[in-house]
Amino acid sequence: MWINYCIFICICDLIVCQSLTKDRRPTVRIAQGVVTGIKVYADSGGVADAFLGLPYAAAPIGKLRFAAPQRHGGWNGTFQASEYGPSCPQLPPKEGINESEDCLFLNIWAPEITSRYPLPVVIFFDGEEFTKGNRIPIPGQDLATEEVVVVTINYRLNVFGFLCFENQDVRGNMGLLDQYFAMLWVRENIRYFGGDPDKVTLYGHSAGAASVALHMISPRTAGFFQRTIISSGAATSPWHFTTNAKSASFEIVRVLGCLSSYLPSILQCLRSRSTQDLLKAYEEYQQSGNYSSMLLPVMDIFLPENDRYLPTMPETAFKSGTYMQVPILTGITKPISFPQYALWMKLASQGYTQLQQFAELSKIPEIMKRYSLNGRFKKQISDFIDWRYIEPSNGDVRILLEQLKRLEFESKIEAPHFLQIQYLLSSYIQPIYVYYLENPGIMLNAMDSPLTPDLLLLFGPLLLNQIVRRRFNNRELRLSQHIKQLWKNFIIFGNPTPSNQIKTWYRYNSVENHIEYLGTDSQTSSEDTIQRSRRINFWNQLLPKLAAFTFDEQNGITRELQNTYVPGAGYRHAMYTLSGLVVALLALLLVCIVLIKKRAKERERQFQMVY
């Protein structure tokens, strides 16, 4: 009897101790001070330690507005890391969203801290065209229970993150430097949270993916990360990099009434304006249609050499191999929504003609400006794009919406993605794994969200539930578990299939362009591969060649041939080759014009039938 009583008391004590351990808030000491987090539960039932809203840099307000990030001074007492920090200011304004210029915070999720070996770390960057981020906090506990330390960060966007005067006072790239500062913070502190600072994966989505690629070419990030995941974004995209942010910046200065010949006066004026004033001026400039000059990351060769972050154009760095050579997992997913989808739906409600005029008079010209396709043949190129994408549809608005989605996806995501891979292959020695995630049918009412299915599948049911208040169905759950396993393997080993337990995912190389298709049971056919190549070459080769083509009207030969004289057979051979190319391009252009005119007549007849 006495023995049974003792056993009962011991069991009770053990239960109480375990309960107290579970309820005890995780606490760590870092250079800035003591931090206390919270316990959070994953959908699987596992427990993770979460540290939310940790400041990784000083607040970029007052004199630090538009400045490079500075170290945070720390705090006295204990920092309560139990709530997300505010998001960085962005458009469009939305009620109920906590936003502030004091927004340089990061969030950490880790398996319950023990004395185990340090775990691999993944740092996640999101963003959309560097103008806005994901206003829905991404919960990291589901991924953290897979024995990975997860870090998400806020960084400055739009006018606050990328205003650029091409000098040391307003240097541009502040948003990228925020990310760099967060990486530095992780390198110095992540071991206190159970992470390994020498086993870090940078994971970016959309503009965040372009950011990861840009950090690869920066000379200042050596040793900061050992692998990269680049999802639905590329540094080679004209939506993610510019050579002309200065003119856009001074146009915004003009809109704000801050123009002056004295730079300190301009800065004083800009720093005196409210957050909303700056966002309104930025929005006004965005709507002006000057897409050839936007606030985006820039090459900063105007700075002293030891202060430059991006001294080289992305394509130059990738071609020459002057970048961080680490394993890459990269792929694309068709978005659930698009940045202008709300506008498209509004125009669609007004009728087919309104939406078609937007496509032909606004969307196609925007894309052409981004791609620098406004040469002598810009009218023909515009008609060519229109002919390829805006097909007659008997006035069916739904078909036109699908055509717009296809135009947006292929020009903004697919073509730049494969162009970046092409550049990387010219000098890359580390493995590259490429995927294409077919939309598994996750349809969301999330028009303001830049999320794609791969993020929802990776970060688990908690993220999906935040958006649409539902759980994965069985098919989605299986795909989510499969993707988690592949991504986890890559984060740990630099290879998504290191063992024979999963079907081998082969590297992508110049000989075999292996792409892993996820979310579909069928394998891609050779016809699919041919069609994809045609889509990519349309944007990456054909249109740029047509735009660059110059023709001398007086004698009918290209200026390139006119200005080149090298006597001998080699010259004649080159001349014949180039002449043949010119004839072929002209023939193609004539065929396109004939087809476009034929298409226009068909469309006119259809309009008469509809209206």
Image: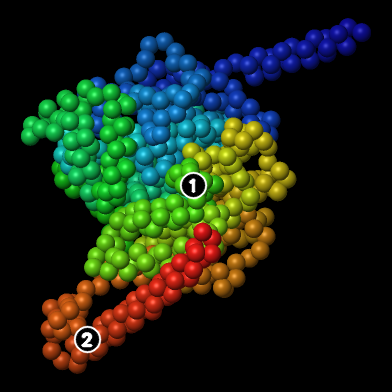
Q: Amino acid at mark 2?
A: Met
Q: Is residue 161 left or right of residue 600?
A: left
Depth order, front residue of 339/234: 339
The residue indicated by pointer 2 is 575
Left or right, 383 with respect to 440, comes to left
Evaluate whether residue 368 shows in this view.
yes
Residue type at mark 1 is Gln
Whole-percent x, y for residue 500 in the image: 65, 58
Query: Going by the image, does 67 lie left or right of 387?
Result: left
Instruction: Using residue 457 as the reference point, say whether residue 384 is left or right of it.
Output: left
Crowding around mark 1 (Cα neighbors within 10 Å: few <14, some 14 to 19, many 20+) is: few
Image quadrant holding the N terminus, namely top right
Q: Which residue is mark 1?
A: 350
Residue nearest the viewer, comparing 589 with 183? 589
Real-space Cα distance between discs 1 and 2?
A: 54 Å
Q: How is the image coloured?
A: rainbow
Q: Closer to us: mark 1 or mark 2?
A: 1
Determine the image quadrant of residue 202. top left
The x and y percentages for residue 455 are 54, 43
Q: Is residue 20 above or below residue 57?
A: above
Q: Could you tell me which secondary element the residue under label 1 belongs to?
A: loop
Tell me the crowding category of disc 2: few under 14, some 14 to 19, or many 20 or more residues within 10 angstroms, Cα based.
some
Query: Residue 305, image x and y in percent?
Result: 17, 45
Task: Label 2, secondary structure: give it.
Answer: helix
Name the residue furthest right: 1
In the image shown, does 41 or 257 lie closer to the viewer? Answer: 257
